Image: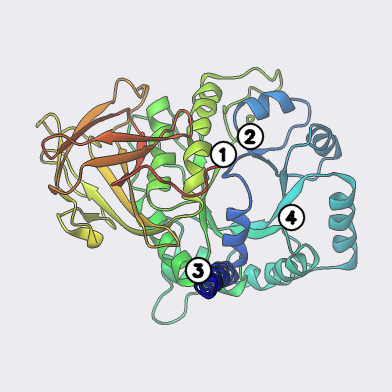
């Protein structure tokens, strides 16, 4: 009997050691960027420049987990550091390369102002500039191994010559070619781009070609992928001020595609009105919309940081078309055998009154999905663009788990008669799973 007890104990210890070894191997196999994402709160940040209008309390109340300092201004960094906020620094283009003077400047800033967690090296580099920026990125990664080091790419829409930085070689130079060079030449910890879809007159540009290409390249490189989203208007470029449903839709569509960091352009007025009025520092309506949204993003992000996006599908309502670069959902997609049908209430076709569904797995192979209502519009609130959705499920599904956007706590809902009915506010998504309400990353 004693031998049996010892044997059982030894087996249990061996199993625990094996499991710990597997965990360590899994973590070791993660890229620098993925390790950083998992070890930090979900990143929400907004580009800021003006020290005089920066109020650290207001920034924190907007549920922004990091400050994106776009220019090296000591007064801004003093305010950020004094309040204990985390910050990322934009390292300006330096055509003369990584000089000793530049190294000394970056080291001084890091030493003098606490809270730095990331470096953004150049903005929208073309191909020749990537080789210059790559040396700075390599040095920063070696010098600050715990920091995130990355750049920001062009969105789709520029010319091949702009991407390539000169005459294009035979065979052309696509946006996918550009993003692959961007991620490979500079060896960035993440892939980040900026794209602003909300147009004056009410139109919304199709973001899927850009965000799905960034997702593809990032998965090839095994790195996280982030995006700058629109939180400003710009009369010169024809951008409207995003409504509540607008900004929620842009953020949640990225989360549904597996994005693990959101940056807003901009915090205070830079190229047009934004969250904070310049120079008086008053908060505009979009500030409060973003603050509420970010609370939900950070709550869901606690789990999303630990999930791998496996597939993304589009569910059109009525006679709506499926946008380019995204695939229509059908039963059985992405290995999912539980959802038999998805029904959006209301048969009349309305622009963007559609759904996006993203499928995820955790480290143990457990399945999750995110269902997002894409309906949004100029001046439209999330309540005005709400839709009710019914999922017809396989008979074995008795419970659906939800990670609450509002509280960050898991919830379980009984499935009755093979149907699960849920109302999604405009531009808003829910993180769900079948069978239980166990989500990774929760305390």
Q: Which residue is mark 3?
A: 222
**Mark 4 residue element:** strand
Q: Which residue is mark 1?
A: 265
In terms of sequence position, does the residue under pointer 3 or pointer 1 come before the other? 3
- Of circles 2 and 1, which is in front? 1
Q: Which residue is mark 2?
A: 270
Give left or right: position of 80 versus 404.
right
Quadrant into which the C terminus falls: top right
Give left or right: position of 437 versus 81.
left
Residue 108 percent location from the top left of the image:
90, 53
**Mark 2 residue element:** loop
Q: Which residue is mark 4?
A: 91
Vertical arrangement, residue 216 with respect to residue 270, above or below: below
Between the C-alphas of marks 4 and 2, the distance is 18 Å
Residue 232 percent location from the top left of the image:
53, 32
Q: Determine whether label 2 and label 1 are within 8 Å by CB.
A: yes
Between the C-alphas of marks 3 and 1, the distance is 26 Å
């Amino acid at each position: 009997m004693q031998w049996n007890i010892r044997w059982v104990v030894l087996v249990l210890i061996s199993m625990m050691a094996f499991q710990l070894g597997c965990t360590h191997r899994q973590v070791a196999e993660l890229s620098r960027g993925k390790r950083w994402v998992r070890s930090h709160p979900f990143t929400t940040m907004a580009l800021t420049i003006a020290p005089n209008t920066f109020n650290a309390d207001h920034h924190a109340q907007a549920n922004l987990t990091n400050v994106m300092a776009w220019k090296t201004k000591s007064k801004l960094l003093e305010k950020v550091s004094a309040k204990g906020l985390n910050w990322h620094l934009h390292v300006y283009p330096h055509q003369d390369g990584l000089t000793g003077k530049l190294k000394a400047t970056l080291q001084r800033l890091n030493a003098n102002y606490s809270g730095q967690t990331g470096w953004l090296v150049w903005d929208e580099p073309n191909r020749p500039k990537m080789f210059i920026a790559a040396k700075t990125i390599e040095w920063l990664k070696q010098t600050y191994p715990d920091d995130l080091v990355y750049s920001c790419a062009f969105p789709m829409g520029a010319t091949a010559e702009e991407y390539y930085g000169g005459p294009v070689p035979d065979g052309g130079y696509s946006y996918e070619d550009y993003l692959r060079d961007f991620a490979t030449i500079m060896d960035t910890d993440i892939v980040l781009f900026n794209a602003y879809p909300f147009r004056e007159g009410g139109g919304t540009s199709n973001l899927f070609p850009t965000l799905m290409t960034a997702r593809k390249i990032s998965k090839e490189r095994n790195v996280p992928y982030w995006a700058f989203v629109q939180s400003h208007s710009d009369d010169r470029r024809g951008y409207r001020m995003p409504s509540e449903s607008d900004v929620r839709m842009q953020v949640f569509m990225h989360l549904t595609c597996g994005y693990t960091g959101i940056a807003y352009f901009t915090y205070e007025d830079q190229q047009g009105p934004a969250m904070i009025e310049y120079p008086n520092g008053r908060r505009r309506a979009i500030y409060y919309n973003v603050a509420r949204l970010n609370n939900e993003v950070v709550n869901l992000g606690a789990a999303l940081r630990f999930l791998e996006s496996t597939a993304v599908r589009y569910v059109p309502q009525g006679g709506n078309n499926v946008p380019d670069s995204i695939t229509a959902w059908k039963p059985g997609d992405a290995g999912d055998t539980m959802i038999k049908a998805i029904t959006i209430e209301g048969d009349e076709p309305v622009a963007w009154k559609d759904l996006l569904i993203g499928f995820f797995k955790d480290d143990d192979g457990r399945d999750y999905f995110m269902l997002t209502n894409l309906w949004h519009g100029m001046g439209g609130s999330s309540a005005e663009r709400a839709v009710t959705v019914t999922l017809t499920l396989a008979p074995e599904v008795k419970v659906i788990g939800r990670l609450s956007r509002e509280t960050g706590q898991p919830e379980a809902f009984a499935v009755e008669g093979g149907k699960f009915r849920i109302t999604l506010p405009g531009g808003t998504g829910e993180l769900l799973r079948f069978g239980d309400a166990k989500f990774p990353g929760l305390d």
